[in-house]
Amino acid sequence: MLEKQLSGHRVDRSICAWFWDKAISQPDSFKQQPVIASPTHYLFQVLREGITFLACTQVEMPPLMAIEFLCRVADVLNDYLGGLNEDLIKDNFVIVYELLDEMIDNGFPLTTELNILQEMIAPPNIVSKVLSVVTGSSSNVSDSLPGATASLVPWRTADPKYANNEIYVDLVEEMDATINRDGVLVKCEINGEVQVNSHITGLPDLTLSFKNPSILDDVRFHPCVRYRPWESDQILSFVPPDGQFKLMSYRVRKLKNTPIYVKPQLTSEGGTCRLSVLVGIRNDPGKTIDSVTVEFQLPSCILSADLTSNHGVVNILGNKTCSWSIGRIPKDKAPSMSGTLVLETGLERLHVFPTFQVGFRIMGVALSGLQIDKLDLKTVPYRFYKGFRALTRAGEFEVRS
Amino acid sequence: MFPQFGATAESLTKASTAVLRIGTDAHLYDDPEDVNIAPLLDSKFDSEKCEALKRLLALIAQGFDVSNFFPQVVKNVASQSLEVKKLVYLYLLHYAEKRPNEALLSINCFQKDLGDTNPLVRAWALRAMAGIRLHVIAPLVIVAVQKCARDPSVYVRKCAANALPKLHDLRMEEHASAIEEIVGLLLNDHSPGVVGAAASAFTSVCPNNFSLIGRNYKRLCEILPDVEEWGQIILIGILLRYVIARLGLVKESIMFSLFNKDIENLEEDESYITSNEEAGYAIDNNVSELGNMIFQCYIEGPDEYLSRSSSTNRVAPKLDVSQFTSCSNEVVKILLQCTSPLLWSNNSAVVLAAAGVHWIMASKEHVKRIVKPLLFVLRSSSASRYVVLCNIQVFAKAMPSLFAPHYQDFFICSSDSYQIKALKLDILSSIVTDSSISFIYKEFQDYIRDPDRRFAADTVAAIGLCAQRLPKMATSCLEGLLTLVGQEFFCGEIRSLDGEEGVLVQAIISIKSIIKLEPPSYEKVIIQLVRSLDKIKVPAARAMIIWMLGEYCSLGEIIPRMLSTVLKYLAWSFTSEALEAKLQILNTTAKVLLCIKGEDILTMRKIWSYVIELAECDLKYDIRDRARFLKKLLSSNLESQHGEEENSESQKRDQSYILAECILGGQTKAVTVQSEPIDFRFYLPGSLSQLVFHAAPGYEPLPKPCSLPYTDLDQYDGATKSDSDEEDPGTSGSLDEESASNYSSEQSITGSGNASDSDESVSGNEGEDNAKPLIQISDTSNVCDTGFRDLMSTKSLESWLDEPTRSSKGSEIKQSQIRSSSARITIGNIGSRVKPKCYTLLDPANGNGLRVNYSFSSETSSISSHLVCLEVLFENCSLEPMFDIVLIDEDYSKSSDSTNQTSPTTENTLKFHVDKPALISMEEIPSLEPGQTAKRTLLVRFHHHLLPLKLALFCNDKKFPVKLRPDIGYFVKPLPISIEDFRDKESRLPGMFEYVRSCTFTDHILELNKGSNSLTEDKFLVICETIALKMLSNANLSLVSVDMPVAANLDDASGLCLRFSSEILSNSMPCLITVTVEGKCSDPLIVSVKVNCEETVFGLNLLNRVVNFLVEPSVTQL
């Protein structure tokens, strides 16, 4: 909460004080506002895991650029520090400073590719920590410029060497669905990502093709993907960065089915309200559905709630959030939760209704139906191991009651 | 600092992470001051230095001022350890502006680092040096950037591009052209990474210098997909502006069609209809008008547009057809082609920027392409979702059909923040169509039950908007709203639910606006609302219902009949009503009274007088006022009705009746379709201004269409041809080599003092690599003056031989005088030609008729070497005589203590001599008659060779503050030396003491044209003369030698070389200037000027001055 890097025109630290004053005086609305016009500056804020990243400017600039950059900083720090929290940042404040200095110069992003940053400034790890304890000194700043900055593939570490060449391709999909009060599926779509973890020696040139690319509604690519082959043949041709990265994200719209159903029912009379929620499998995807959870926020007019379930655990947290973790749906019975909610005195019936957020995970299936056809390696002669996986989980899966 | 947040770091997690924190810098952060930092900084070991620096950083992070360690830290800049360097740079940049003098200590180190073999070191040094932001070192930084811009390492070039805006921030007009030149160079770089950074430099340095873009337009477009994402964002904007400025709007774009609707009404309307049918959507005039306005705003800026539209009633400026281009135009096509793949970018900012280009440039069919990517971006972080939605909102308003089929994407998730929900609702209500309304309406019904009541209220408002937009749906919307109103009053009494009131009020507002559309058909609705009056308790809602009652009191059949009952009820409840409801009861009663006919009239009057009575003794004066006002207004009306037939024709009463009618009944007429309250300010898509609804500083609307002159156009065409010629053979490899070889020669110059001399000639003649026959006599070093005289034409030889015989005035400036006298021989009017430039010190307009001009004289002071001689000319232009004119230095006492702290360790780059007065006191002019002039010689001690000196001029006892601008050309005095001495001195000042800049020189053309009839005149000689004259009349130099090429081509002046020598007044250091000419005699020449001087800062400034005056065309010669 104290970290700051000043570049460009001097910005007084007091702008932060102003920000916090405001944030404390109007906690809800202020924190959600990504662009704030303060009396002296324009502020951009991105909130990640309790850490607020602020950027400020006095002149016109593309706001998304600032926001995207802050997100990138958060990602990079997350990667470097293995998480994001106040202590981690404090403990590694020197690295944070060095990173920021490398990432932005005079208000314009300089180096934001993780691969290159890692070569310039070594991430903290156990070895370096131990080393610094023992010897009392260690430098995390690299002595030479990463070769990649000069190459035509600036995202890739210059010349990595691996004993085992392997590449893993994961399809990670998130299902967004909205089911309205009448139980009708209003919206159902998949937002997927192709995540690749590559450990290949040299400068591999890969092509990845899908069996059914036509189902993709829209796509976004990592900078390494060449646009031309996709435009003409819908083939992904790319030179991958080293390590884990997101090759592309895609969207498949207008799906007809969800794997599970959640049916909430609320009936209220005489100051109490009866709630029951049923969960079950609608379309068996062929693999087990696990980590099923149902969460909802009790409306503020509810004084107390008494909820039980025949499977899984029900928890009501302090902020009136109720979470029911079911885990794996049993074969023999449909899990259900029921109970009564006591309304505020004077209130006969419930007039506002909570929305239920559903979570689940299915390993081994991409619900969109997207299938990878083949992954080929050009330019590098030797053999390598290819691994494919798929995973679907719930994104913004909402059931209204 | 923020204790409330410090507390959030819970003690529990602290204990658990304590183990993990071993080996990190945590202890440094927690107690940065537990050891004495100062000795650590002076330590021999890098690790200890590191620790100390880390502690300092920790202190900075926590908001302490540790600038007192500055001198110690700066010393460490010379460290070899990169980590120490990095940390020092971080510290240095943080405090450099506060401690400028100490920061200067580090400059030499940076200079050295710039020559390092490690590109990382070079880049860091450049970044730090540029980041220090001091005026004094700016010339040094420019040279450094110039060198780094040709560095073989991409990273260094990128840093050079990034350094340009920093330089630009210092606002040095004299270097602006140099900076722009570098921008152009970097934009031309073959590495996409550099181009991105250069684009960013372009926007901040010279956003309107489109000729730089024009030259490279095609290549920039092609390289665009490979540029890194941040650069793409900026570059897209630049290219868009360029195309608009050059070609204007695109005929097929929606922007044009909306913009130009008035002009080509027929055609456009047809296309509208077809497109509407496709989308199944009816664009009413409102929408297209809005679109028109949006685009006007893009071009003119909203403030300008709004002010114009209010004054001249929205007469769009007549648009020339020539201001438009078509999509098939090559230039537009390339831009659209190259930006469309960027819609797939991972970076939402890039997507939005590319979408903006298509929005403005692309044809109507192609604009559709931006829809899906924009919607996909909505899945990224919530902050960017908000920004994108804000932009979609504008798009959707201007062209609803674009987003209409995608209404599902704007359905609300419970995880959305309130702002996002509100935006989505607004978009939904503007893109709603007949086919989608049922789905959207169903959604809205769900939203009304959302626990967030503020959002529910907004939903209700959105329903109202939808109903207004699609009258077909109005009835069903109204029904929904009525049931809502019916529901809400159940909880109307519960105080804790503040939100409910809002929902209810909003519902009534929506109902009201729907009724307004077509009051007669909604009679029953009004009745139903009025019936629910006894249940609805929210004052605002009650007030509105009561208003409706009054407004539509004569509507239909049932309402007039129930009026008396309702009014009785209202009168009865009057005392318990809230303020707003009371006011409305008064109004309504008055309205009813005006329009009512028949038997009820008596009851009405009773109610009226009862209500008025109550109101007149109300506690609130608003109500009392209103009551009195209405009473007075209606009194005549009432009386006339009282007195039945008698005197009913009275004019006066009639008038007041009409008045009352107008005031109370007038509102009914204002039933028009009101468009939703939009903020009528639109800014370019993706701009910050669009989000904050005002023009942020630095916001610029699109350039005026076709504002770019056509000369640039030709340039572009030529450039593309040559571009394509060049590109094919050497896109990557050969260019790389070239820059590398350039670099190596320069590096050796920068690097160390013992670089071989042979390099210099390479750097001097860098450009001329082709093999034109060129004999450069000077290179053969043995040939002395007499040698090359033989080679000249006889005519010029005579003039050369003549020169020694000419007498000169002062012995110490002998040679320069000789040079100018030789000019006299050929031209014949020396007096006007070697006249030093005259500057104005005081304008007669400002000085009560006193004109004071000054010029630098070539004489040097005999008193002190720090003094510069000036000739000041006083002229009385007024009609009265003037007395006691004197110039004095007032600031002397003040300034002497402020800058005097410059520590003795400061390098010789900067020496302030402020301990002495700046002006050797001038002889006073006792009186000056009108029209009379007086001349005085002034000896001035400038504090710095760039900063103007503030003086006070007294005349007639009045004080005029004046500024004396120094001319660095007169901070030197001629140093007459032989060519051998010159060479010798030059060889001792290589590397970092040598600076080269080139410029164009055009003066000689005039001169050549003038003497074109006398063919005998030697062109070379003329050029020599003009250059020499220019040099000598602008700076106090002495000409050492002139080398002439003996070229087969008589028109080729390349290789002409003039040498001048001088020494700095203050410390007698030699300062050598070499001017080398290149190009054809009759064309503008490219002149490269080289300065060798031990004092780097001075030398650079002198170089810049020389280049500046060489470039600027001389007026005196005409």
Image (spheres, helix red, strand yellow):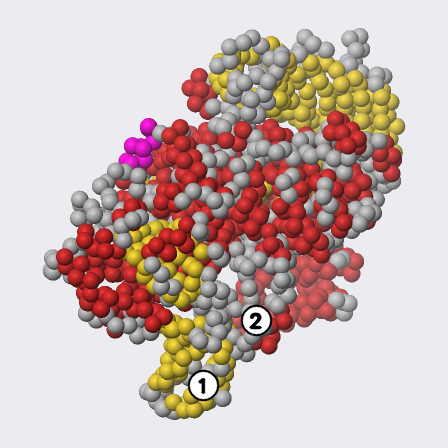
Q: Give the residue displayed 17% in from the left and 44% down from the top.
A: B1048
Q: Which residues are magenta?
A: B721-729
**Magenta-drawn stretch, dominant element (helix, strand or loop):** helix
Can you see residue B123? no
Q: Which mark is residue B914?
A: 2
Q: Which sits earlier in the primary sequence, circle 2 or circle 1?
A: 2
Which of the pair B273/A23 is nearer the observer? A23
Label 1 lies in what chain?
B
B872 up-or-down from B680: above or below? below
Which of the pair A145/B39 is nearer the observer? B39
Amino acid at the residue labelled 2: Val
- Image side of residue A330 versus residue B953, left or right: right
Number of residue marks: 2
Q: Give the residue displayed 74% in from the left and 26% down from the top.
A: A127
Place of residue B446 in the rendered image (x, y in percent of width and height, measured from the top left): 67, 32
Place of residue B469 in the rendered image (x, y in percent of width and height, measured from the top left): 52, 41
Cα distance between the residues tagged 2 and 1: 22 Å
Amino acid at the residue labelled 1: Glu
When asked about the image quadrant of residue A148, the answer is top right
SS category of the residue bearing label 2 = loop
